[in-house]
Image (spheres, rainbow, N blue to C red):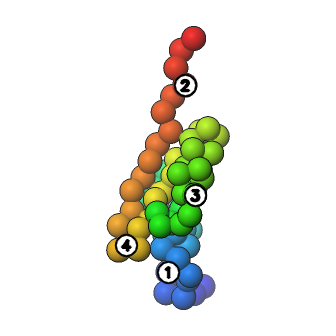
Amino acid sequence: MSDLRERRHRSEAEKAFMEAVELGIEERSPYPDGAVFFDAEQPDVGVAIARAAAEGKPVVLCSDDGTRQILYPSAPAAA
């Protein structure tokens, strides 16, 4: 199988996602299950993060400089 991390990808988020797939196969992914990947510089990234949080999904925020931040949704407040 080819190493997906070495293929050309369009964005930092796509690179991180492909890395997660490769490492997940080896059960070594540093990212939480069900995480969604977004480019920090994409337009409306805040809306995408809010939508993911509302769905209870963690976010991997990927910057052009190669840094990645994992954002976890907060638990809903008790009524």
The reply to whether residue 24 is visible in this rendering is no
In the rendering, which numbered label is found on residue 72?
A: none
| Residue 66, disc | 4
Q: Position of residue 40 (x, y in %)?
A: 46, 63
Q: What amino acid is labelled 4 in the image?
A: Gly
Residue toward you, 31 or 59? 59
Assess whether mark 3 and mark 2 are in contact (beta carbons under 8 angstroms): no
Q: Secondary structure at mark 2?
A: loop
Which quarter of the picture shows residue 56? top right
**Residue ID for mark 1:** 5
Which residue lies under the disc numbered 2? Answer: 76
- Residues at badges 3 and 1 in contact (C-beta under 8 Å)? no
Q: Residue furthest top?
A: 79
- View extreme (front): residue: 43
Whether the residues at callouts 1 and 4 have beta carbons within 8 Å, the answer is no
Distance in Å between CA atoms under marks 3 and 1: 26 Å
| Residue assigned mark 3 | 44
Q: CA distance from mark 2 to mark 1?
A: 36 Å
Kindly report which numbered mark, 2 or 3, lies closer to the viewer in this rendering.
Answer: 3
Q: Earlier in the sequence, mark 2 or mark 1?
A: 1
Q: Mark 1 is on which residue type?
A: Arg
Residue drawn at point x = 39 percent, y = 56 percent = 69
From the viewer's perspective, is residue 53 above or below residue 21? above
Q: Secondary structure at mark 4?
A: loop
Q: Does 28 sit left or right of 8 as displayed? A: left
Q: Nearer the viewer, mark 1 or mark 4?
A: 4
Identity, as a three-letter code, of the amino acid under mark 3: Asp
For marks 2 and 3, give the CA distance: 23 Å
